[in-house]
Image (spheres, rainbow, N blue to C red):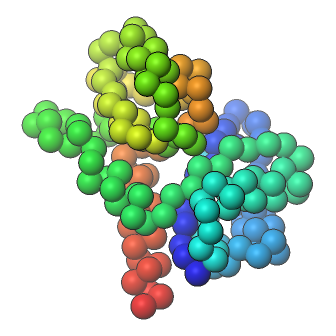
Amino acid sequence: MKSYIALLRGINVSGQKMIKMADLKVVLEANGFQNVATYIQSGNIIFDAPETLENELALRLSKVIADHYHFSVPVLLLDQDALLSIIANNPFLTATDVELKQLYVAFLSDTPLAAATAVLQSAAIAPDLFSIDGKTVYIRYLTSAGVSKLTNKRIENKLQCDSTMRNWKMTVTLSEMLSKRLLEAE
C-alpha cells in the first residue's frame, strides 16, 4: 500500500460540481480506496491504495466520482516524494522580500510541451511571476490571486493540460498531513 494525495479540480466553486467531503470519503472507501481522509471543501483527499501507475489511479478515482456524482472532475495525484520535491524546489522561496501568502502552486496533469510553455511565458501577466518545472507551475502573485491575469484557466488554456491550484500554505499543510500519516504507519 502507498499513500497518495488527490487534488480535485473545480469542485464546490460558485455552487458548481458540489461534493460533500464526508460523502466522498464514504464513496471512495466503498470503491476500494483505504484510509480516506479529506481536507476542507476544495477537494483534497489523502488515501491509501496498492502501488500502481499514478495516472491509472487518478483515472480510477475520476471514474468513481463521475459514476457517483454524474459529472467529470479532473484528478491530479501526488505521492509524498513528489510533494516534498515541489516544496523543496520553489524558486520564489529564496527571494528576501517574499511573503508566503503570495505563493501558489499549479499542479499540472502533464508536463507541458515547450511550445505551450513559450505561449504562457509570452502572455501578459505582469507584475505576477511564475516558473514552470515539469508538471508544476510555481506562482508568485505580486498583485493578488483574485485580480491577477495569471489564472488557473489561463494556465490550462496556454499549457493545454489540466491544472489545479493550491496556495502555499495548503501545499505545505497537505505535505505535513501525508508525512504524519506515513510516520503513524511505521
Quarter location, residue 58: bottom right
**As rendered, which of 75 and 127 lies closer to the eye?**
75
If the image is split into quadrants, where does the N terminus sit?
Answer: bottom right
Pinpoint residue 146: horizontal percent, then vertical percent: 47, 25
Position of 12 with respect to 106 (left or right) is: right
If the image is split into quadrants, where does the C terminus sit?
Answer: bottom left
Quarter location, residue 88: bottom left
Residue in the image at 67% along x and 61% along y: 57
**As rendered, which of 111 and 91 lies closer to the eye?**
111
Instruction: Look at the picture and state if 174 lies above or below 150.
Output: below
**As rendered, which of 86 and 180 lies closer to the eye?**
86
Answer whether residue 92 is visible to the viewer in this image: yes
**As rendered, which of 89 and 116 lies closer to the eye?**
116
Instruction: Look at the picture and state if 145 lies above or below 74.
Output: above
Instruction: Look at the picture and state if 88 lies above or below 50.
Output: above
Answer whether residue 173 is visible to the viewer in this image: no
Residue in the image at 46% along x and 42% along y: 135
Specify the farthest residue to the bottom: 186
Instruction: Look at the picture and state if 154 lies above or below 1.
Output: above
Pinpoint residue 70: horizontal percent, then vertical percent: 89, 47
Pinpoint residue 71: horizontal percent, then vertical percent: 84, 43
Residue in the image at 59% along x and 26% along y: 160
Specify the farthest residue to the left: 96
Pinpoint residue 54: horizontal percent, then vertical percent: 60, 59
